[in-house]
């Protein structure tokens, strides 16, 4: 079934570390050989062996309209015909900035970059430059890109500084990063009581998507906003994943809490490499060339990539888009939970907008420790059972899933039919 993928993977491992260009693609979390894809159309992918799959990864979130959307492709082709890159200002950059500042009231000014990692790294440097402080607060289980001072896990106890999670990251670079428990308002209160005047920024995935899908409590996000305001810290919402994915104003619109800075990526590029960070005018005014905080990028605002993002966002922000997307995603998780219940398998699922999480436990988790308590081996068996039946889920128990506007009744029914047999396998195991 996967002969060509196996051959390509073996060849790739000779010239690419691990055979992949991003670690989760290697299937190390679930075992087996990664699938090599050759094309996508709408909600479907086709691999190098010709197998077809209903896709719930969506390039890890960007493909909110589905693959190869014909109108988006036409606009991208026209932009490419005018030139691939100029390294100079373009009208398209202005159009993107105006669209983002209209859609997100907390964003008064914005700068375009080329990835989510770059956006978060730049936002944190900006926060430190604006406040004159150095301490960063992040939360266990939240991923904000692979910059050195964010590759960090919790210390040995509450309110201790973090330890590096990657070789090559010196401990001194993480010694000013404090890692707290997600969804624990009291721990945040304690951290601010002890370090409040040293904290430059608090960075948060306002809906966690990198320890699977975990919602914050309203009290948690409101506590962050109140304490950052009180002590002069910069509140950063990392909406690289949630921006224009969970609602037309991102997670900040869902929870009604305005951050000082927002980072964006994925959907705003429509499948091309685009990121952004923006927020309050007084903070953004610290950026070069008008301020002392340096940030630059040769391909920032690339005209072809920005065209793909604009073409996507204009359709995503059309009236009724998120009503339909949310309904499809809710129907997906409800149907999967129903099939699991019939099979007697401990399972829960939840969603927001076009994001969802699947868990082999009785109720959706609210913290990193609860995510870690899920039955990972049951997920791995389920993943492979679904893959064999033509459904492509994220190859890790700790990643959120994504639905596109191209998913419809036929795709859901194919998913439920596969799940019916996969849950039966899980029960037998």
Image (spheres, rainbow, N blue to C red):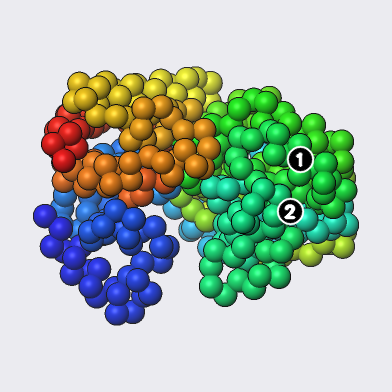
Q: Tell me if residue 407 comes above or below residue 381 in the rendering.
A: above
Total numbered labels placed on residues in the image: 2
Taking the image as shown, residue 44 lies to the left or right of residue 255, namely left
Q: Disc 1 or disc 2, which is closer to the eye? A: 1
Q: Secondary structure at mark 1?
A: helix
Q: Where residue 11 appears, x then y in whole percent?
A: 24, 75
Please tell me which residue is depicted at 41% across the width and 27% down the height of the picture.
363
Q: Earlier in the sequence, mark 1 or mark 2?
A: 2
Taking the image as shown, residue 302 lies to the left or right of residue 376, namely right
Q: Quadrant of residue 193?
A: top right
Residue 190 is marked as 1
Q: Quadrant of residue 403?
A: top left
Residue 136 is marked as 2
Q: Nearer the viewer, residue 390 or 366?
A: 366
Q: Where residue 389 appears, x then y in whole percent?
A: 16, 41
Q: Quadrant of residue 176?
A: bottom right
Sort mark 1 into few (<14), some (14-19) or many (20+) by Cα contacts within 10 Å: few
Residue 341 is marked as none
Q: Residue furthest bottom?
A: 14
Q: Where residue 233 appears, x then y in whole percent?
A: 82, 45
Q: Quadrant of the N terminus?
A: bottom left
């Amino acid at each position: 079934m996967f002969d060509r993928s196996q051959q390509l993977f073996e060849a790739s491992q000779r010239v690419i570390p691990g055979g992949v260009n991003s670690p989760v693609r290697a299937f190390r979390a679930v075992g087996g050989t990664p699938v090599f894809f050759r094309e996508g159309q709408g909600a479907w992918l086709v691999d190098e062996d010709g197998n077809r799959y209903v896709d719930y990864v969506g390039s890890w979130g960007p493909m909110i309209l589905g693959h190869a959307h014909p109108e988006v492709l036409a606009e991208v082709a026209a932009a490419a015909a005018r030139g691939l890159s100029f390294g100079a200002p373009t009208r398209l950059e202005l159009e993107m900035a105006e669209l983002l500042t209209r859609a997100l009231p907390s964003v008064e000014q914005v700068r375009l970059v080329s990835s989510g990692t770059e956006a978060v790294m730049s936002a944190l440097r900006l926060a430190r430059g604006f406040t004159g402080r150095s301490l960063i607060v992040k939360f266990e289980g939240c991923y904000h890109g692979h910059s050195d001072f964010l590759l960090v896990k919790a210390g040995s106890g509450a309110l201790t500084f973090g330890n590096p999670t990657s070789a090559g990251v010196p401990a001194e670079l993480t010694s000013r990063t404090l890692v707290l428990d997600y969804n624990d308002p009291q721990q945040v209160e304690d951290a601010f009581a002890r370090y409040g005047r040293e904290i430059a920024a608090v960075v948060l995935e306002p809906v966690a998507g990198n320890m699977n899908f975990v919602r914050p409590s309203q009290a948690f996000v409101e506590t962050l906003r109140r304490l950052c305001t009180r002590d002069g810290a910069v509140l950063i919402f990392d909406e690289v994943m949630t921006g224009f994915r969970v609602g037309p104003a991102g997670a900040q619109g869902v929870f009604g809490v305005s951050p000082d800075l927002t980072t964006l990526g994925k959907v705003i590029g429509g499948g091309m490499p685009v990121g952004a960070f923006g927020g309050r005018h007084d903070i953004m005014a610290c950026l070069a060339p008008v301020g002392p905080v340096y940030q630059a990028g040769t391909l920032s605002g690339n005209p072809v990539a920005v065209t793909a993002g604009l073409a996507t966002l204009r359709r995503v922000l059309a009236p009724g888009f998120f009503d339909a997307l949310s309904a499809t995603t809710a129907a997906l998780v409800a149907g999967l939970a129903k099939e699991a219940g019939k099979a007697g398998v401990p399972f829960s699922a939840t969603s927001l907008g076009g994001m969802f999480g699947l868990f082999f436990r009785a109720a959706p988790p609210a913290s990193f420790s609860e995510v870690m308590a899920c039955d990972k081996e049951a997920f791995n068996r389920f993943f492979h059972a679904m893959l064999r039946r033509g459904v492509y889920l994220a190859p890790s128990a700790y990643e959120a899933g994504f639905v596109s506007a191209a998913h419809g009744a036929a795709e859901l029914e194919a998913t439920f039919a596969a799940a019916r047999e996969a849950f039966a396998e899980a029960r037998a195991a």
